[in-house]
Amino acid sequence: MSHCGFRRIGGRRHARGWVLRYRDGLARMVVAGLFLVWAQAALAQKGQPLGPGLGQLGSMLDDKSHAVRLKAAEGLGRVGGRQAVGMLRKGLHDKELEVRIAAAAALGRIGGWTAVTVLAEALKDPEPQVRVRAVEALCEAGTVNSIPILARVFDDEAESVRLRAALMLGQIGHHRAVPALAEASLDDPSPAVRAAATRHLGIVGARDQRAVQALRRVLSDREPAVRMRAVEALGNVQTAQAVPALQTALQDADPAVRSRATATLGHVLARTLE
């Protein structure tokens, strides 16, 4: 039953009295934990109305204990729905880093376009850790619909955030991500980001001519590690243009890159003859 947790301690009114009477942080954490259990039970009862308990759970985002606010965000993520998304927007602006991260994770768990639009706000958070979690949550929440938002993340000042954007676009695995990954593979100031974008470009753009064109240009990158990722990515490409690109890499100044290009070209040629 969706409200069984509160009936065992005397009904909803009694539970509300608990919240009002206990003021110390430990007691509020216990109450928030009870709400979390109730939220999980509510999920199991499809079609059952959530009642006023959802509002009470959301109100715990205003509690003075950040541990309680964190539990409230987690509970809202389990309950889901548009009402929970609206409440979690407040959590994204919490003064505590951990609560903002929990709110972003909860929105990713809920998913849907409304959650995606709210998560886009978290990409402006001053802390890179929150922005990284928001990028991950966008992948979870919106998949293909998140690609335009994730593409803008490559303007972020933090390398860690841009790296995670490349990874998430690779996980989504849709060809709509090719332009963003191609641009990052060529223009990002960080060799690590360029390498990551290059690697995932070969996966996402395996049948896309635009990916091959970008990878050929990446073969001129000043960093051998990035050029190596381009060679490997070309090995995933399933178009005829991969062969001449790999032939170019056979002349690379770095022997490790030439070695990888030689091995990759052999695999690609063998595959075409199968």
Image (cartoon, grey):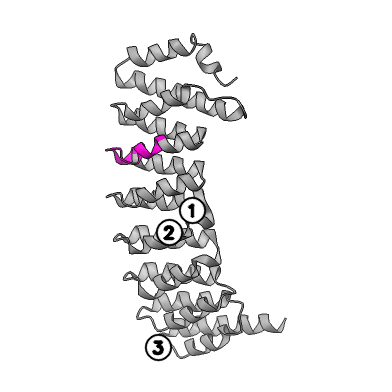
Task: Kindly indicate the quadrant of the structure image that contains residue 18.
Answer: top left
Q: Where is residue 16 in the image (x, y as percent from the top left)?
A: 41, 14
Q: In this view, does 192 lie above or below 158?
A: below
**Pointer 3 or 2: first along the chain:** 2
Query: Marks 3/1: CA distance?
Result: 38 Å
Q: Is mark 3 on a helix, strand or loop?
A: loop
Say whether residue 98 is magenta: yes
Q: Is residue 191 left or right of residue 211?
A: left
Mark 1 element type: helix
Determine contact: label 3, label 2, CB under 8 Å. Answer: no
Whether pointer 3 and pointer 1 mark residues with C-beta atoms closer than 8 Å, the reply is no
Q: Position of residue 12 (x, y in %)?
A: 47, 14
Q: Is mark 2 on a helix, strand or loop?
A: helix
Are the residues at dot 1 and dot 2 in contact (C-beta closer than 8 Å)?
A: yes
Question: In this rendering, would 47 be left or right of 137?
Answer: right
Residue for badge 2: 150
- Crowding around mark 3 (Cα neighbors within 10 Å: few <14, some 14 to 19, many 20+) is few
The residue tagged 3 is 253
Amino acid type at circle 3 is: Ala
Q: Which three-letter amino acid code belongs to the residue tagged 1?
A: Cys
Q: How far apart are marks 1 and 2 (CA)?
A: 8 Å
The quadrant the N terminus occupies is top right
Q: Position of residue 244 (x, y in %)?
A: 54, 89
The one nearer the camera, 195 or 208, is 208
Residue closest to the eye, 115 or 242: 115
User: Within 10 Å of the Cα at label 1, are there few (<14), some (14-19), or many (20+) other Cα atoms?
Assistant: many
- Mark 1 — residue? 139
Magenta stretch bounds: 87-99
Labels 1 and 2: the sequence-earlier one: 1
Circle 2 residues within 10 Å: few <14, some 14–19, many ≥20:
many
